[in-house]
Amino acid sequence: MCRRLVEVIHARRSPSRIARKKLSTQSYRSIPRIFLDLRLWAGAAGLAIYVHRWWVTVISVFLIGFGPFHDLLVQGHEGTHDLISRNRRVNDLFTWFTLSLAGISAEAHRRGGALSQPPRGNVGSLVGPFYPDFEVCTACECFKMEL
């Protein structure tokens, strides 16, 4: 067989290609998790109000902070990568909602995250504001190499 044909057949059956295809057909699970987090938040707050003891309130605030609140921020971060829903408007709505609970702008989070990531197309190179050989252009927020 031709060597190129063998490479093409191997590329079509590569594990990474199969994994990408499988992952792209999976449903997103962020929206049910957002509603679960809100229910846990409301349940812990309701328990603190019902029992009306200071130590239950402290425990509830602690549980809300490290449980549902943290997970809502994670889901909001996923939304900045368009991973909440395939529908852009639904994704933006839930991203805005989850991040606004912490007073974070979804657009600011998206732009700030883009500055900490290497630009696409430079796979394998260490490019970004955290590496000393490169700087961010303030005019257009692109990455430029220092000479």
Image (cartoon, rainbow, N blue to C red):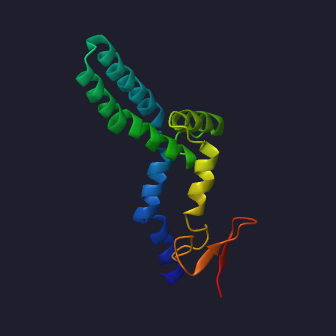
Residue closest to the eye, 72 or 10: 72
**Residue 120 figure quarter:** bottom right
Query: Which corner quadrant holds the C terminus?
Result: bottom right
Q: Can residue 35 be seen at all in this image of the molecule?
A: yes
Q: Give the residue at the far top of this rendering.
A: 50
Q: Residue at x 44, y 50 (%)?
A: 22
Nearer the observer, 71 or 64: 64
Report whether 60 appears left or right of 35: left
Q: Position of residue 89 (x, y in %)?
A: 65, 35
- Residue 77 in the image: state x and y as whole percent: 50, 46
Judged from this view, the residue extending furthest toward the front is 54
Residue plotted at (69% across, 65% down): 141
> What percent of the width, then of the height, locates residue 70?
39, 40
The residue depicted at 23 percent of the width and 24 percent of the height is 55
Q: Is residue 25 above or below residue 15?
A: above
Left or right for 29, reference 122: left
Q: Is residue 102 left or right of residue 121?
A: left
Report the residue that reaches farthest toward the right.
139
For image coordinates 71% across by 66% down, the residue present is 138
Front residue of 115/78: it is 115
* Total numbered badges shown on the rendered structure: 0
- As drawn, 68 above or below 5: above
Is residue 82 something one can see in this rendering? no
Choose between 95 and 12: the one closer to the eye.
Answer: 95
